[in-house]
């Protein structure tokens, strides 16, 4: 994982992985928001495994962009139900089909907060792709610069 930007007390971290890879330990027990950007189609089993690991690891807001956004959001919703978290430990999801990286990052930075102000935001690129990783990183830095970060 690579820290790409900070703003106030929020840190934005990028991690790229192949769909068959295991997700590394993330932020301990600290709740966080995640942007899952898939660069290509993946199997339902891979989506389920990755979203289950995200939510079990503390992700409480999943923003889906890139390929198969609706299926990624559904996998995250299913993982939330399977994990049977306490009622006050809600997981929010959003799908951004066809939206460019800058719009999805804008949503992550400004809207993926609910009643929590997540100190950590993960940009998870599934299907490692250096140009996509750099573009998402640039979008985060540009958005934080625009808000005075």
Image (cartoon, rainbow, N blue to C red):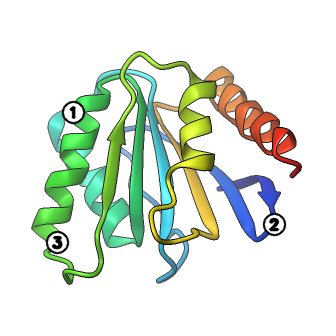
Q: Which sits in the foreground, 47 or 32?
A: 32
Chain-order first, disc 2 or disc 3 = 2
> Which of these two is toward me, 121 or 53?
121
Q: Which residue appears at 39% of the width and 65% of the height?
A: 60
Of labels 1 and 2, the one closer to you: 2
Q: Residues within 10 Å of mark 2 (few under 14, many from 20)?
A: few
Q: Which percent across, then down, holds residue 25?
A: 49, 70
Q: Are marks 2 and 3 in contact (CB under 8 Å)?
A: no
Name the residue that disc number 1 marks.
71
* Whole-number angstrom distance, CA of label 1 to CA of label 2: 33 Å
Horizontal and vertical percent position of residue 91: 31, 63
Front in this rendered view, residue 7 or 27: 7
Q: Position of residue 115 (x, y in %)?
A: 46, 70
Residue bearing mark 3? 83
Q: Is 81 displayed left or right of 132 in the figure? A: left
Q: Which residue is mark 2?
A: 8
| Mark 3 secondary-structure assignment | helix
Q: Where 15 falls versus 53 (above or below)? A: above
Q: What residue appears at the point 88 percent right and 49 percent down from the top-left corner?
A: 148
Task: State the SS at label 2.
Answer: loop
Q: Mark 3 to mark 1: distance in Å? A: 18 Å
Q: Quadrant of residue 146?
A: top right
- Looking at the rendered image, the disc whose residue lies closer to the viewer, 2 or 3, is 2
How much space separates mark 2 and mark 3, taking CA atoms? 32 Å
Tell me which residue sits at (20%, 83%) in the image: 86
The reply to whether dot 1 and dot 2 touch (C-beta < 8 Å) is no
Question: Along the polypeptide, which appears first: circle 3 or circle 1?
Answer: 1
């Amino acid at each position: 994982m690579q820290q790409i930007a900070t703003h106030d007390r929020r840190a934005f971290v990028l991690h790229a992985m192949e769909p068959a890879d295991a997700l590394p330990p993330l932020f301990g027990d600290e709740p966080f928001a995640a942007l899952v950007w898939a660069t290509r189609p993946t199997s339902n089993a891979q989506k389920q495994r990755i979203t289950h690991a995200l939510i079990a690891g503390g992700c409480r807001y999943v923003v889906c962009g890139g390929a198969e956004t609706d299926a990624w959001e559904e996998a995250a919703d299913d993982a939330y139900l399977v994990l049977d978290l306490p009622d006050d430990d809600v997981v929010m999801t959003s799908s951004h089909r066809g939206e460019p990286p800058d719009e999805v990052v804008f949503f992550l930075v400004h809207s993926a907060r609910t009643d929590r102000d997540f100190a950590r935001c993960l940009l998870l690129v599934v299907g490692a792709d250096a140009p996509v990783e750099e573009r998402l990183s640039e979008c985060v830095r540009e958005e934080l610069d625009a808000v005075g970060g």
